[in-house]
Amino acid sequence: MYKNLKKVHSEPYPGHRLFLILLGLFLFVSSVKAGSNDQEEGGRFNPGEMIMHHITDSHVWHLWDGEHGTIFLPVIVYSKERGFDIFSSHRFYDEHHNLVSYDGYTLEHEHIVLEGGSHVYDFSITKNTLWLFITALTVFFVFFSVARGFKKNEGRAPKGIQSFFEPFVIYFRDEVIKANIGSGYEKYVPYILTLFFFILFGNLFGLLPGAANLTGNIAVTSTLAFFTFLITNFSGNKNYWKHIFWTPGVPLPLRLIILPVEIIGMFTKPFALLIRLFVAITAGHVVILSLISMAFIFQSWAVGFGSTILVVFISLIEVLVAAIQAYVFTIFTAVYIGMATEDEH
Amino acid sequence: MGAGIGAGLAAIGAGIGIGRIGGSAMEAMARQPEAAGKIQTAMLIIAALVEVIALFGVIINFLISLG
């Protein structure tokens, strides 16, 4: 009766094919990152500048050195003097890649300044903005497919991309959102799920070579934390506000002491969220880039080999960190919303 | 030099913190092997939280070293 069993290719350990593919991918990624040569200041490699260039935002998308290796993103500026101006950031560079001034605008340290010093509102599509759109579109398309699959396979087993994401969605709905918020949790499920998958995809995209450090940008994490702050405080019920401003069950002098502490606590909770995500992702990138720089500082093949292997392992850890930080942000959001909508106890 | 010393101290902090978490997790898993999965998940999450604090130190020292 065992003759009909299909013989599987011998498996040294489960998932060995996927692991080898990922390992190969990361080795390739590391060699590509190491290959892209950065400006040598006066002949010496400057790791600090290379690292800052990789983790900060930029008006151009530099893929590789060479004629067509840079994608010049559009610059959209508004100033009271000149109104709206839209042009390609190519105009900021001449043939030798030096910065020139165009039409009175100059790029100084990635900030656009206008002759005469009046304030310029920069709405350009920078590298981070572009990757924000890419991440948002990816989340959009993936979950539209999942939703469509869910509707089509009503009552049957899930297929395709739906079968990959549906367990995560169900896990979040039950273990994270329902467990922390309790009754009335349905209202918050869309926001919290979107938050998790947006941060997860943003973190993972940031690890790709040539991509922008999206979730390591403090403006992006501030916005996410601000949304959490808004949603938490707008869904706060009477008990929540009573606990903050006029804590029940404590004597009067203590209430006056608790009041400023609670008000500050209202702001430190989302602040901690934003700092945690920003630091975790940016520091991860800095560590990886520093290890890659080691090969260039020592100018040695042996160090290059060793650092590539180290970078592969740290990159795998960074993938784990990407997932964990997204999960931590999400579960703290769920906990704060739960605390805000708690019933009298 | 200050940046170097700072980075080292941050690493010590991370090492102590995560070491303690790992230690308690090992102990708990040894006492109750059935709960090993849950303990491992909780350990990873808390390790990420502690690590972020150490990474604060790394970033600040890095920025100091850049001048």
Image (spheres, coloured by chain):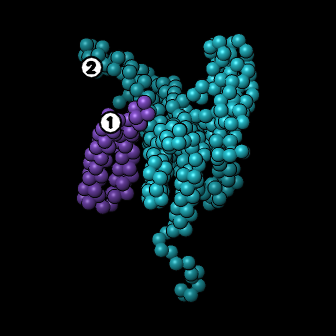
Chain colours: A cyan, B purple
Give the numbered dot on residue A224: none
Disc 2 is attached to a residue of which chain? A
- Report the residue at 44% width, 51% height from top: A298
| Nearer-the-camera pick, A23 or B64 | B64
**Residue appearing at x 38%, y 21% in the figure:** A264
Secondary element at tag 2: loop
| Residue A21 can be seen, yes or no | yes
Q: Quadrant of the N terminus of chain A?
A: bottom right
Kindly identify which chain the residue marked by label 1 belongs to.
B
Q: What element carries label 1?
A: loop
Mark 1 surroundings within 10 Å by alpha-carbon count, few (fewer than 14), some (14 through 19), many (20 or more): few
**Along the viewing direction, whichever of A129 and A96 lies nearer the viewer:** A96
* Disc 2 residue crowd, few under 14, some 14–19, many 20+, Cα 10 Å: few
Quadrant of the rendered image containing residue A84 = top right
Tell me what residue is drawn at x 58 percent, y 56 percent: A164
Whether B33 is drawn above or below A63: the answer is below
Q: Quadrant of the C terminus of chain A?
A: top left
The residue identified by callout 2 is A250
Residue pushed farthest front? A42
